[in-house]
Amino acid sequence: MSALARLFFYCFVFSASKNFAQSIALFEQHNGRYDYTALGNTLNLIENGVYSDCSILESSSAELNLLADQTVVAAYLYWAGSGTGDFETTLNGFSINADRIFTHSLDSNRQFFAAFSDITELVLSQGNGLYTLSDLNQINTSEAYCLSGTNFAGWAMVIIYEDLNLPLNQINVYDGLQAVPNSINITLENLNVLDVEGAKIGFIAWEGDVSLSVNESLRMNGYLLSNPPLNPANNAFNGSNSFTASFGMHNMDIDVYDIQNTINIGDSYASIELTSGQDLVMVNNIITVLNSQLPDATIQLADKADTTCFSRTIGLEYSILNANSTDDLPMGTPIAFYIENSLIAQSVTHQIIPIGGIATDYIEIEIDDSVAEAFEIVAVVDDLGDGSGIVTEISETNNSATIEVELSVEGCDIVIPQGLSPNGDGINDIFDIQGLYDVFTNHKLHIYNRYGTLIFEGDNNNKWNGKSNRGSNTGSETAPVGTYFYVLYLNETDYKPRSGWVYLNY
């Protein structure tokens, strides 16, 4: 095919392209004295294009150079290429399988892929040094890709690290696979902008061409981003690496921009707009670094509530955590407990909980008689009891925990009192046998005086209040003070009658 024909084909396929991809969304959030770096390399021999060699390298390398006081918190590997996908690769001789995959279809003949793997443990074991990626064997460099200048392969590593000399930052890791031409709009949610100083945004993008920048622009909240000479305003994705301040990353970019003047304190989201009149650019990863000092309250409940036979009072151990945070959680943070959205109890934190700290407490809750024996309690921290809170947090969606509770009835022995005093004061006015009435509903109770005369017969609907309903003294008068004897027939299989004495006093 002639060069002119190849050029015509190159222009035609882009004018007819359609986008099918996965939207960029928040993947993970890290809070602390953190920052990030990125490294990686292309597997393209040269930049793709009409006259390019479409060969793909067998491997390529990049170097990690963290300082002595920088400690790896998380490490992520992204790799991508032309074709339907190669989701197994090798890094420093270790086999890597994709944890998540992304795909994009330009048209029926040209598909692209990206893949992700969490390699934190590998980087912790390998440390600084050269990282080599190899064994990407399923890269498609057929004419459909080669003649249109869309053949590529590459890889990048994102390293989140802790440095105690840093301010407290919030790092949001977003990923997906969205592409131009002609334009895409990405909304970055879950931001907490408390201070714009040092704010920055980074991108990992694939297939951008340094020589193809028709109507290309990158905006954040309407502001045009640029970082000359690496990333001019009209050619943001041009095979550059901000961390090494270099070009030559054929058809991939690892870029970082200062965004102090594009965001405002109080912002909870940001809008990214990428336009391109011709160049195919696929955004795979976006990272924001914002100074942020906020607590993040979460609550954990014990595996089991403390219950007592025949009691509707339960005990519940709970812990308030301030784990993924950048500020202390204040004393007095409210805690609410609910059953079926009805408030049943409240508490507060009794101490300041530092960053990464935990405080354990205990509460006793009286369960209303209207609640069934089995129920679910939802505990919510930073809740005034009406669903509203008083603490601004990193996340407002992780404040609750749930536990299933069953009051102790089955398997409990009955408790028979040794006295009653039916004097009308509301205390011990009846012979109240705990655990009897809701379990042994067919029971019969016989009360005898000291002469062995039956003076009372009762059942589940007729409790002894000291008066006789059998014999010559039946009536409204309370039986004389003294010792009486009972026989309790439970009328259930495997349960023998109970007998004993009870003292009646006024």
Image (cartoon, rainbow, N blue to C red):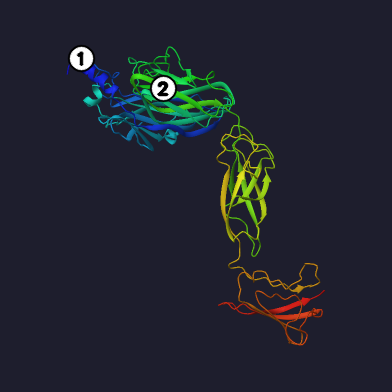
Given residues 506 and 501, the one toward you in this image is 506
> Residue 296 in the image: x percent, y percent?
59, 37
Note whether 196 is above or below 100 in the view shown: above
Q: Residues within 10 Å of mark 2 (few under 14, many from 20)?
A: many
Which numbered marker is on residue 254?
none
Which numbered marker is on residue 274?
2
Query: Which element is circle 2 on?
Result: strand
Q: Which residue is mark 1?
A: 4
The image quarter containing residue 194 is top right
Q: Residues within 10 Å of mark 1 (few under 14, many from 20)?
A: few
Note whether 18 is above or below 344 in the view shown: above
Instruction: Tell me the amino acid under the disc marked 2.
Output: Leu
Tell me, yes or no, if residue 125 can be seen here.
yes
Q: Residue at x 39, y 21 (%)?
A: 253
Given residues 423 and 251, the one toward you in this image is 423
Given residues 254 and 482, the one toward you in this image is 482
Query: Which element is circle 1 on?
Result: helix
Q: Are marks 1 and 2 in contact (CB under 8 Å)?
A: no
Q: Residue at x 44, y 36 (%)?
A: 121
Note whether 423 is above or below 349 in the view shown: below
> Residue 482 in the image: x percent, y percent?
80, 79
Left or right: residue 101 versus residue 388 is left
What quarter of the picture does the C terminus occupy? bottom right
Instruction: Tell me the amino acid under the disc marked 1.
Output: Leu
> Residue 187 in the image: x percent, y percent?
47, 28
> Residue 422 in the image: x percent, y percent?
79, 73
The image quarter containing residue 441 is bottom right
Compute the Cα span from label 1 to label 2: 30 Å
Q: Residue at x 66, y 47 (%)?
A: 361
Left or right: residue 500 versus residue 411 is right
Q: Residue at x 39, y 35 (%)?
A: 117
Left or right: residue 443 versus residue 71 is right
